[in-house]
Amino acid sequence: MGCLPDVTVLRTRLENTLLSYHSLSEEQWRVAKKSKDVTVWKKHSTEFNGFLYKAEGIVKENPHKIVDYIRPGPYRLEWDSLMTTMDIVETLDKACCVMRYTTAGQLWNIISPREFVDFSYTTEYQNGLLSCGVSVQYDEQKQNCVRGFNHPCGWFCVPLDESQSLLTGYIQTDLRGLIPQTAVDTAMGSSLTNFYVDLRAALKI
């Protein structure tokens, strides 16, 4: 097992980082992909030599139920088509845990399956919720899987009215390995728009 930093410090730093992303002005972003009801933007990340992606769309449900489907737990693996395994390897308190998960190959396996180990934290935000995470050093990686690294990521979910919420995500994933940036951009844009499609379908069941 790896040695986690102080949990209070880690979650405070993570929350503050996500709040700083959420306060960025519109002109700092450029559109990466746009569908009928989801928009994905990107900007150069300050964390690594890649991009920070922002995704936004409306989901017809209240924030608590939506975030129950997003954060680590029994629902996520059932509906997220990109996620192939997920285990909570350590529960730190009711708001924090460490999760290990794997993702499917993408773009005809140009991007092979990846493994991630993330610290996850969920907290209240403006009558809604923020569920955020960051990769941590923890355990040895699987021999048949490249371990990727998530720099601070998260989902803000706030109610628009009694029946729908605005879901805004910030994702910056270092997939590692020799992957062309154009392939990463295509995969990230598609996976983020598909995330909303899969989530909406799951919430209707």
Image (spheres, grey):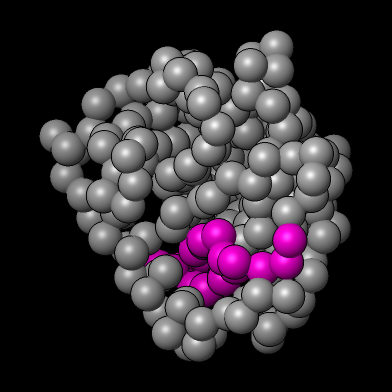
The x, y position of residue 154, in whole percent, is 49, 55
The residue lying furthest to the top in this view is 108
Residue 136 is one of the magenta-drawn residues: yes
Q: Nearer the viewer, residue 20 or 56?
A: 20
The x, y position of residue 110, in whole percent, is 63, 16
**Secondary structure mostly taken by the magenta-highlighted segment of the chain:** strand
- Compared with residue 129, is residue 156 higher up or lower down, i.e. above or below? above
Q: How many marks?
A: 0
- Compared with residue 31, is residue 90 higher up or lower down, i.e. above or below? below
Q: Which residues are magenta?
A: 119-140
Residue at image x 72%, y 33%?
Answer: 113
Tell me the quarter of the image containing the C terminus.
Answer: top right
Residue 132 is one of the magenta-drawn residues: yes
Left or right: where 18 falls relative to 43: right
Residue at image x 34%, y 46%?
Answer: 48
The x, y position of residue 38, in whole percent, is 47, 27
Tell me the quarter of the image containing the N terminus.
Answer: bottom right
Left or right: where 127 falls relative to 135: left
